[in-house]
Image: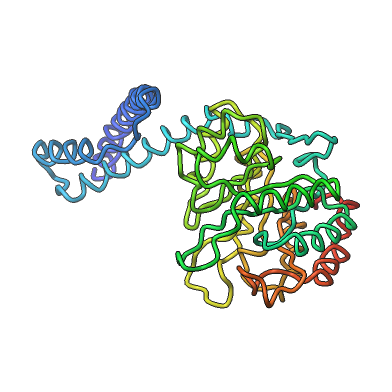
Amino acid sequence: MPENRVAELRAQIDPINLQILELLNQRASIARQIGQAQQELGVSHYDPEREAQMLQELEQANNGPFSNETIKALFREIFRATLALEEKDARAKIRVQRQTPDEKTIITLPDGTQVGNSLFQVIAGSCAVESFEQMDEVGAALAARGVRVMRGMAYKPRTSPYDFQGLGEKGLEIARQVANKYNMYVTSEIMDASQIPMMSDYVDIFWVGARNMQNSFLLRALGKIKQPIILKRGLSATLEEFLYAAEYIVSSGNPNVILIERGIRTFEKWTRNTLDISAVAVLKLETHLPIVVDISHSAGRRDIAIPLARVVKASGADGLMVEVHPNPPVAMSDAKQQLSIPEFNAVMDTLELGMMEPA
């Protein structure tokens, strides 16, 4: 009977399925060992030449009935699954990866101020240090609202070499004077590892900008100092690349890293970047490091600061970063995105910062 013949053939397929399953798992186990060895060597898991060689050998050995294209498609899926397994194993071993739901890094400043302890914090200040008078007016406004960390950017990497590049060490001196006057901490962007000794005299928290997120030499150097590091997501960096950048710092000896989400490049033109608020949720699952969101560079405009700040608060972020200037229209950099002092106070009023825990 045809029905019996079908049953007999199906009975032959069932053990073959189990054999294929066993072989796939054996292959995955060996691939895991290869991945561990590659990790120790510091090389990439993905080897395109090796993949091409395997596909060529399979094509030469194929006697049908599957076509070569079908065989290659099937094995490419096996290769992708294996690579994903190796990458998952590698991520599980990095220091910045969250191992338990309650694991979290808390950055504690000398006066006991903490970032990452479930209290929403604010980092604020002008885009760049322009003068003592400018920073003094901003510092007074920040201190009045309980802000503990002030931006004091003395070096400004700009798209055009002809735009304002910052005041350099003179700007750091001004930022330090204002911070001391109002009992605040200074964070400032570092451009090169050679600046660490000089900047250490002025800066409490080092800031790695988006353009330097993958500067491994700088990241390793910052891993050897004691000050906390603010690490900003690169212009087009994936979250995996972001975490591996943090790993350079942490694995070099400095566990005090704060991540900043600053928006990503998309086709949208009505904002400077597109705020990737989903990044906060994903990073909270993947890492124990505190996460702050930059609502100034992500939007590039001040008129949506309040709704963006509300979104940041609701996302569960550990804080936000916002730029403030006494007179934004005449600011020497990023004039469109900096808040006036009344606008800054409106954001603070809206969120009741320092009194509410993140949602």
Q: Nearer the viewer, residue 156 or 107?
A: 156
Q: Is residue 61 above or below residue 149?
A: above
Residue at the location (41% across, 32% down)? 86
- Where does the N terminus fall, quadrant-wise? top left
Snapshot quadrant of residue 256: top right
What percent of the width, then of the height, locates residue 359? 80, 53
Residue plotted at (46% across, 43% down): 215
**Nearer to the camera, 258 or 174:** 174
In the depicted structure, whether residue 296 falls above or below residue 190: below
Residue 244 vs 338, above or below: the answer is above
Q: Specify whether 67 is left or right of 108.
A: left
Depicted 215 relative to depicted 157: above or below: above
The quarter holding residue 107 reads top right
Q: Position of residue 270 (x, y in %)?
A: 57, 77
Residue 109 is situated, as x and y percent measured from the top left of the image, at: 78, 36
Q: Residue furthest front?
A: 170
* Residue for point 85% across, 49% down: 181
Which residue appears at 57% of the width and 54% of the height?
Answer: 155
Along the viewing direction, whichever of 4 and 302 lies nearer the viewer: 302
